[in-house]
Amino acid sequence: MLFNSFAFLVFLPLVFVGYWWLFRTLRAQNVFIIAVSYLFYGWWDWRFTILLFLSSMSDYGFGLFINAQDEARKRKRALLLSLVFNLGILAFFKYFNFFIDSTAELLRTLGMHPNLWSLRVILPVGISFYTFQSMSYTIEVYRRNFKPVRDPLAYLAFVSFFPHMIAGPIMRAVDLLPQFMRPRVFDYKKARDGARQMLWGFFKKIVIADQCAPLVDRIFGLDPATTPGVTLFFGAVFFAFQIYGDFSGYSDIAIGCARFFGIDLMRNFNYPYFSRSIGEFWRRWHISLSSWLRDFVYVPLGGNRDPKRRTRNILVTFVVSGLWHGANWTFVGWGLLHGLYHVPGTLVGVQKPQGHPELRDLPRMLWTFMLVLLGWVLFRAATVHAAWRHVRYTLGNALLSPGDLIAHVWRPEMLLILVMLTAEWRSRREAHALVHVPGMAALRWVLYFVLVLTILLNVDLHTRHAFIYFRF
């Protein structure tokens, strides 16, 4: 079920009423959350719910088994079994065809004619998100940072909670699971702030991302060799804001929606395009994944402890990040590129920017954005070769035409992006752009009305744009 669908518009109020007025005890609320979450997930394909249930219950059992072992060797074996099970499921559904097809392509390059059997497997929506969340539970139990939960209902609610299950934030058991183990009371202020955050999320998704999407598709579908460099450049720019509006918009909707039910999810975006370095960008972009990879991949590899292996650890972590996003060499290249961005700063010990970004930081912000933009070309392109041609002809056809520049700068999509950036710059110290809306109550309601009207005017009744990160 899509957040930006009529079905969800009906689903959410019914779930809200049932949760607070019909199911008031903790156990009943957890059962209700599980039921509606499985309905939400099964809206795409009911078979997905079977995989979700098997994955959840296996890690529930692994957590109890790991905790029951006293010998370190047995605990480690149990953890490895859990990781193999989870990563095996992820590899089968997400990467099996990728490796088969890549092998076939390599053999054809060598002059062979392979006849490799390949499965056509439907990728379950959001499998990377709930698999990583479930894996973090068994790892934390193994490290004795968290005691395994005995209540299977609380655990199932933790994994399947519908606002964030499909595309995050990736929540740690230590942060989210206890919230399903204690009574929840309706908090009007929390729900009100959640509604504001959802409104801003819908604005970024429907008004920014969905309006940029057709333009991005058209530009990336052109032949770069015959396309002006300024057009190719703005294709990358519009994609940067499409993916930001799409993914951060989803996170805002998920976090706001969760607050309706008395649940707090972690912040996933902190105005990343105001970053003053690549390191800061990754502390502001997809924060839940960045912190997960840091704690469960980078640190176990050795982190910064051994300077000789620090570069290797960085590159491996970012390649894993790329592979997590999808089964395509473009994602591997994107992750490797960001790893290479990190290496010089790590080796020379560049000091992290302090405090909130200010106007005096604009040159560093623009430079960081340009580096990120290069990565987004790899992320969006169908192949590594296509990404290379896009960048090559962006620079090669860079003869600036004032008419082409004006045509892109004054597009409605660019004006909407500037509105969004202005609002987020004003509120860059806050959790989201509508936390504190200045002025009298009447003016605030006028603003809310304008945002709602803008969203409704930009809704495409014939096309429902799925969130980009659903494919991951």
Image (cartoon, rainbow, N blue to C red):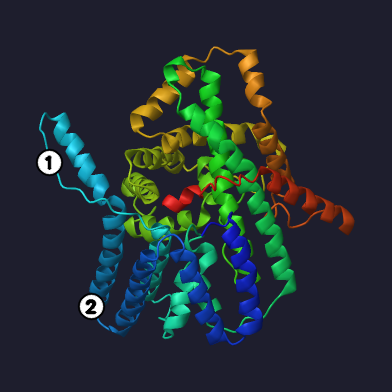
Query: SS of the residue at dot 2?
Result: helix
Q: Earlier in the sequence, mark 2 or mark 1?
A: 2
* Residue depicted at 51% across the width and 45% down the height: 279
Q: Is residue 370 visible?
A: no
Would residue 376 appear left or right of 122 to someone viewing this image? right
Q: Nearer the viewer, mark 2 or mark 1?
A: 1
Disc 1 residue type?
Answer: Asn
- The image shows residue 460 at horizontal and vertical percentages of 61, 44
- The image shows residue 324 at horizontal and vertical percentages of 37, 51
* Residue depicted at 63% across the width and 24% down the height: 408
Is mark 2 in CB contact (under 8 Å) with mark 1?
Answer: no
Would residue 426 appear left or right of 248 to someone viewing this image? right
Would residue 284 appear left or right of 300 to someone viewing this image? right
Q: Which residue is mark 1?
A: 115
Query: SS of the residue at dot 1?
Result: loop
Disc 2 residue type?
Answer: Lys
Q: Residues within 10 Å of mark 2 (few under 14, many from 20)?
A: some
Whether residue 135 is situated above or below residue 17 in the rendered picture: above
Instruction: Pick out the residue farthest to the left.
Output: 112
Question: Which sits in the foreground, 238 or 286?
Answer: 238
* Residue depicted at 32% across the width and 39% down the height: 329
Residue 74, labelled with which disc? 2
- The image shows residue 469 at horizontal and vertical percentages of 47, 50
* Residue depicted at 78% across the width and 48% down the height: 450
